[in-house]
Amino acid sequence: MTDNPRPLDGYRVLDFTQNVAGPLAGTVLADLGAEVVKIEAPGGEAARRITSTTPGLEHIAPYFLPNNRGKKSVMVDLRSDEGREQVLALADTADVILDAFRPGVLDRLGLGARAVQARNPRCVYASLSAYGGDGEEGRRPGIDILVQAESGLMTGLTAEDGRPLPVRSTIIDAASGHVLAQAVLAALLGRERHGTADVVRVAMYDVACSLQSNSLTMALNSAGVSRPPADGRTPYATAPSGVFPAAEGTYLMVAAYVPKHWTLLTELLQRPDLAADPRFADQAQRSLYNADLTRELSATFATRTAAAWEKLLRDAGLMAAKVNNWSEAVESEVFAESSLAVTVTVTDGGRSETVVRTPARYAGFGPAGVTPTPLPGEHNEELLNLG
């Protein structure tokens, strides 16, 4: 890696966002070289106070720390005339505004897209909301788990008692943050090429639906088609593909639905009976009789641990993986080989904490956002000329 200039060196971003999605977008831009100024209300943003409850780790703020490294902090009261004027003056110098207030809030404060771009026509204004419609639904507040529930993402994720379960990680927040950063970069490119700063809108609900486009496409085209019975079949011709219990309480993920992979799997498992069974003759049949196939494969996989099966199947060229928990994931060879850990100093207390880097890697430069996370209002004097 060489120390080349970063794409956003010299760009300034004002980040009005909180929690995960918006701040993550700001971190992506910070890693690309932008100066990202976090605008915080008196007392600092709420995610600073959402801390771990794990004994010995109570000082870690897992929502704030990875999504605010490398930023500066300005703490102002936007409800005051002085605070609004200070932020507007700062917006005059900005290339990007990141807004995640409910629709209309910053407009009422005189800090919306129209007001900012009237003063600074080159400023890209990017708004994140929970819902993207232009009516009453679009004005509702929402968070990751609420959007998971409404978008259908929890389909098939159930507890033993049938209760729907959310994905534990804030997957919609994370995906929305990356989409917002992508949209900002596109708008900046458009500004440089065409001279016009755009207004960008990203909604978490829209992102959640986009993540499920294959399943929702089936739903959109199901008018007049009877719903398939709950008989264990898979919705697509992708069986076997799923989690199987293995020995010693371990679990194995296997994807062997491609015909040549299915043939190889039956050979490795020494199950010629499966290859000859008419229920499993092709991809469609295997998916129609997925419940039967799952029982047969589970009986065989139960004879060895997931790690043993993983090695056997991978060495033969099949897609298989032991199901890891979070601790196992960060201790794995693939995590280390991917250089995913970034060490960041926390200004409050001077501790060094380890977080996960943003996913893209570049040959010419490393992430810029590895400076300490800021204290609330740490950069007021520098940026608001209060000295």
Image (cartoon, helix red, strand yellow):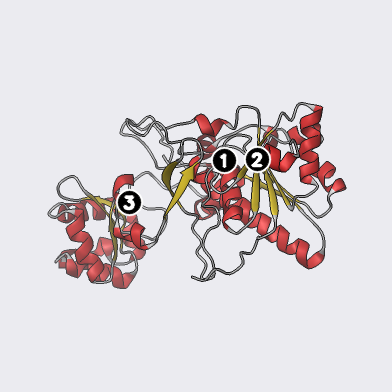
Q: Residue at x 42, y 48 (%)?
A: 228
The extreme left residue here reads 303
The secondary element bearing badge 2 is classed as loop
Residue drawn at point x = 82 percent, y = 59 percent: 196
Point out the tag, 3 or 2, that comes first from the N-terminus: 3
Along the polypeptide, which appears first: circle 1 or circle 3?
A: 3
Q: Amino acid at mark 2?
A: His
Tell me the distance, in whole angstroms, between the alpha carbons under discs 1 and 3: 29 Å
**Quadrant location of the C terminus in the rendered image:** top right
Task: Provide residue 195's location: percent of width, then percent of height.
Answer: 82, 63
Q: Secondary structure at mark 3?
A: helix
- The residue positioned 59% from the left and 59% from the top of the image is 32
Tag 1: Cα neighbours inside 10 Å, few (<14), some, or many (≥20)? many
- Label 2–label 1 contact, CB within 8 A: yes
Residue 189 % position (x, y): 71, 63
Residue furthest front as drawn:
387
- The residue labelled by disc 1 is 374
Residue type at tag 3? Ala
Q: Indicate which label's residue lies in the foreground, 1 or 3.
A: 1
Residue 329 is tagged as 3
User: Is residue 322 at least partly visible in the picture?
Assistant: yes
Q: Residues within 10 Å of mark 2 (few under 14, many from 20)?
A: some
Residue 379: image tag:
2
Using the rendered image of the protein, determine whether residue 223 is visible from the camera's viewpoint.
Answer: no
Work out how far the residue at label 3 is from the one at label 2, CA to CA, in angstroms: 36 Å
